[in-house]
Image (spheres, rainbow, N blue to C red):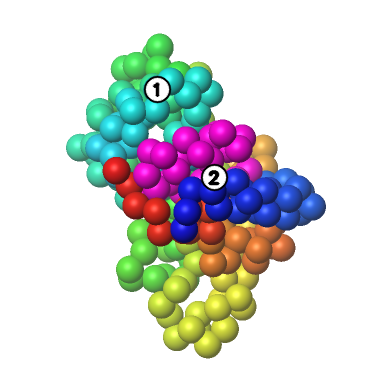
Amino acid sequence: MALHEIGPNLARITSFLATQGNPRLLAVSKYASLEAIKEAYQFGQRDFGESKVQVLAEKEQALAHLPDIRWHFIGHLQTNKLNALLKITRLVSIKAIDSWHLAEALYQKMQALPQHPPLNFYWQVNPNLQDQKYGLKTYAELQEVMLAWQKLTPLPNLQQEGLMVMSSLTSEEAQNDFAAAAEKTFTQTKTWAKQAAQEFGLPPLKLSMGMSQDYAVAVKVGTDEVRIGSQIFGTLTSN
């Protein structure tokens, strides 16, 4: 895909989202070049998602001249990468907290960094029990980590924001009827979010659901954010 296609792609997607409650568009830039990210920025995109800590650090440094760019970490995260990740000053969200071990480590790091800019995180769930995906696989697992989180002393700069999920691309059910399988996953995640918010007396939990192949399904179910890469950037490769 050529650079000149990025603007029209963004216009098409944002126009659609505007008619559907206007969920936030997170541009997945993990395979995008610096030039492609700058092109998207010029067309008004501000939220970008990366899945590798080192790559995110390099891109933040290279694009530091863009004043209001916001970075989201969307990949599987190991605790030994937290120190490096939290050095990224324009990081606003970690999308894939998939265990209490990781959540507790993040809490402890942020507790020691009271001047760190505000950061939110999402629990990654996996209601389809997909072996190839990370995430909390049952509502009981989600209950357990949220109960443990609620027992911690709140930090002003770290907030539990919601749930993130990826639909199946490989299961037999998905191959036979991808849209139906995606809708089942998203509906289950939405149910968990409502149930957890009620159970723990929380404001509505945000939902990050839907990628390039299935964001229209996620919007139909009701999501607060979609994560779209190839529909914006195509196969432009990172520097």
Q: Name the residue under label 1.
A: 64
User: Eyeballing the image, is 41 above or below 213?
Assistant: above
Q: Where is residue 46 in the image (x, y as percent from the top left)?
A: 55, 34
Q: Where is residue 134 in the image (x, y as percent from the top left)?
A: 35, 59
Give SS at disc 1: loop
**Quadrant location of the C terminus?**
top left
Q: Which amino acid does label 2 sit on?
A: Leu
Q: Which amino acid does label 1 sit on?
A: Ala
| Pick the front one: 57 or 124 | 57
Q: Position of residue 234 (x, y in %)?
A: 46, 58
Give SS at disc 2: strand
How many badges with numbers are in the image?
2
Query: Residue at 71% across / 63% down in the picture?
Result: 220
Q: Tag 2: Cα neighbours inside 10 Å, few (<14), some, or many (≥20)?
A: many
Whether residue 49 is visible here, answered yes or no, is no
| Pick the front one: 22 or 119 | 22
Mark linked to residue 26? 2
